[in-house]
Image (cartoon, rainbow, N blue to C red):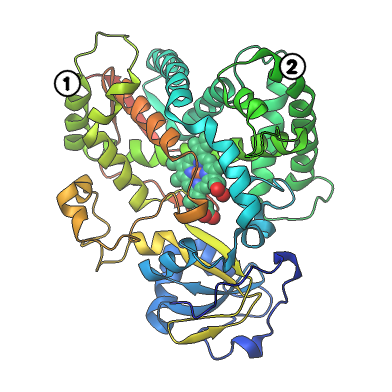
């Protein structure tokens, strides 16, 4: 593993960009001039990484989006990059090119001691007490929306519908009641920011998604900033109100700017990831009616009356649902790779890698390694029984990352997925046309290109 002594991390922004000569000893290639392997990667991120690994091995040099980086693949690569005991990798520097303009100082864009301080303050909003109150709002919102869906046409585009629902649910669990007439403008601004974060043009030129995203950011930051004082007085269980009252270790409140930055990042971190994972989940349940029925029986087995809220205390009983959701995220992880930047020189797998090198580790690659996951393309939730998981490498599965930056919303995500599956399956049957296999656009966050055509019907 790393040969680095545990000295203090350098300020990440002072990092040099290593020249090609400093990386030439690492197998790999730059690809065609300027574009590098960008198009190959965009067309098929998993296939292109697998091809590079076959040709050059699990540690190799690549150039995508004009940026040269070193891929550290497989569970050992994931372990090194994420469980970064010696503070070797900057997450801020890794994510900056993608998220820096729109979500500066979001939690994932902070490093080391500062990150730890902020993460601790934010954690209050993700403990089981607050989660329980979000579940009540999620459950009511999902029940109402499913009733609307059932009254609409049976043939249904799932992806745009779940995207809208996730956004509407976030409005209550993240912002609480009484958001006021600005809500639609805020949702619009937020959608513009997310679209810009995932757009191709990175400069805010007139007419671009980035320009609209930057304007959206101004509006969102202004919205949150104006409301902090009121939220501090008024109380409330939603995430925004919790952050307004959250304190650092010394008892000081977070600054208004920090709260606004964290809120905006949190909404982004939750939105497309939940939309993507729930789309994959529903697709696999529709494609595997036997599994859909097993999960339905598990849900009905809770013995709740029709329309009764799903109690927080009973979520753990939905074990098959949990395993099926995990398996959907194994096959189609919402965050396919994780970028970092080395703040010091290090050594890994026999290669010396200089300070300033951009590194990345691929979640989707690890999730499809046949030596870890036999028949990796097969949907099989039983891979996640305790017994099957026992002998597996502990970094073989990382849809939520791991280590210091491990997803803070992980329990929120499982809760929302279980709540959605419970309410869907106890009321509705979901199917797809025989042989239908949606094509997924895998970057930046997987989504079915055609919107995911499903059919909703009565519960079988
Ligand atoms: C299925 C849904 C989700 C997936 C797959 C997912 C995945 C991830 C991953 C992989 C990371 C780590 C990135 C890295 O190490 O570079 C992360 C970080 C984060 N996620 Fe999630 N996420 C999901 C939902 C959510 C939700 C619902 C929230 C909030 C309610 C959330 C909040 C965050 C935050 C705040 C971080 C940054 C943590 C830190 O830097 O300390 N995520 N997420």
**Rendered-image quadrant of the N terminus:** bottom left
Could you say which quadrant of the image residue 76 lies in? bottom left
Q: Nearer the viewer, mark 1 or mark 2?
A: 2
Number of other residues with Cα within 10 Å of mark 1, as a class: few under 14, some 14 to 19, many 20 or more: few
Please report contact status of discs 1 and 2: CB closer than 8 Å, yes or no: no
Residue under numbered circle 2: 230
Q: Nearer the viewer, residue 175 or 67?
A: 175
**Residue 44 visible to the viewer:** no
**Rendered-image quadrant of the C terminus:** top left
User: Where residue 352 appears, x then y in whole percent?
Assistant: 54, 86
Q: In this view, does 260 lie to the left or right of 351?
A: right
Residue furthest right as drawn: 206
Residue drawn at x 20%, y 19% is 302
User: Where residue 432 appears, x then y in whole percent?
Assistant: 30, 35
Asked whether mark 2 and ligand 1 are closer than 8 Å, the reply comes as no
Tell me how far mark 1 sits from mark 2, CA to CA: 44 Å
Q: In this rendering, is residue 318 above or below 311?
A: below
Residue drawn at x 36%, y 21% is 154
Residue under numbered circle 1: 301
Residue drawn at x 38%, y 42% is 280
Q: Nearer the viewer, residue 364 or 286?
A: 364
Residue drawn at x 80%, y 36% is 218
Q: In this rendering, is residue 145 above or below 47?
A: above
Q: Is residue 319 left or right of residue 405?
A: left
Report the disc number at residue 122.
Answer: none
Number of other residues with Cα within 10 Å of mark 2, as a class: few under 14, some 14 to 19, many 20 or more: few
User: Where residue 123 appears, x then y in whole percent?
Assistant: 53, 37
């Amino acid at each position: 593993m790393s040969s680095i002594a545990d000295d203090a991390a350098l300020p990440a922004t002072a990092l040099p960009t290593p020249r090609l000569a400093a990386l030439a000893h690492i197998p790999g290639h730059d690809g065609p001039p300027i574009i590098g392997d960008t198009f190959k990667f965009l067309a098929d991120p998993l296939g292109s990484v697998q091809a590079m690994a076959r040709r050059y091995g699990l540690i190799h040099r690549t150039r995508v989006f004009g940026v040269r980086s070193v891929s550290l693949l497989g569970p050992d690569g994931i372990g090194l990059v994420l469980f970064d005991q010696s503070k070797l990798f900057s997450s801020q520097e890794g994510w900056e090119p993608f998220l820096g303009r729109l979500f500066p100082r979001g939690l994932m864009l902070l490093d080391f001691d500062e990150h730890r301080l902020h993460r601790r303050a934010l954690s209050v909003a993700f403990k089981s007490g607050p989660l329980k109150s979000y579940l009540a709002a999620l459950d009511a919102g999902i029940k109402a929306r499913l009733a609307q869906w059932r009254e609409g046409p049976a043939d249904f585009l799932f992806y745009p519908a779940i995207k809208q629902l996730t956004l509407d649910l976030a409005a209550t669990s993240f912002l609480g009641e009484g958001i006021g007439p600005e809500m639609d403008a805020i949702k619009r601004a937020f959608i513009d920011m997310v679209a810009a974060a995932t757009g191709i043009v990175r400069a805010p030129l007139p007419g671009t998604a980035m320009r609209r995203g930057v304007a959206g950011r101004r509006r969102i930051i202004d919205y949150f900033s104006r409301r902090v004082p009121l939220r501090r007085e008024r109380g409330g269980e939603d995430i925004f109100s919790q952050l307004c009252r959250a304190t650092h270790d010394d008892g000081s409140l977070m600054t208004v700017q920090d709260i606004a930055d964290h809120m905006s990042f949190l909404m982004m971190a939750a939105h497309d990831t939940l939309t993507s994972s729930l789309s994959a989940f529903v697709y696999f349940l529709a494609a595997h009616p036997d599994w859909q029925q097993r999960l339905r029986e598990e849900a009905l087995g809770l013995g709740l009356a029709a329309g009764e809220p799903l109690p927080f205390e009973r979520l753990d009983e939905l074990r098959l649902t949990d395993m099926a959701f995990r398996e959907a995220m194994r096959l189609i992880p919402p965050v396919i790779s994780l970028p970092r930047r080395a703040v010091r020189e290090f050594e890994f797998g026999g290669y010396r890698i200089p300070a300033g090198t951009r590194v990345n580790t691929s979640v989707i690659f690890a999730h499809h390694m046949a030596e870890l996951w036999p028949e990796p393309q097969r949907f099989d939730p039983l891979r996640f029984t305790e017994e099957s998981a026992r002998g597996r490498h502990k970094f073989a599965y990382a849809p939520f990352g791991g280590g210091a930056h491990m997803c803070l919303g992980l329990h929120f995500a499982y809760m929302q997925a279980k709540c959605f599956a419970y309410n869907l399956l106890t009321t509705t049957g979901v199917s797809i046309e025989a042989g239908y296999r949606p094509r997924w656009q895998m970057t930046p966050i997987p989504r079915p290109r055609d919107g995911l055509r499903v059919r909703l019907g009565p519960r079988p």
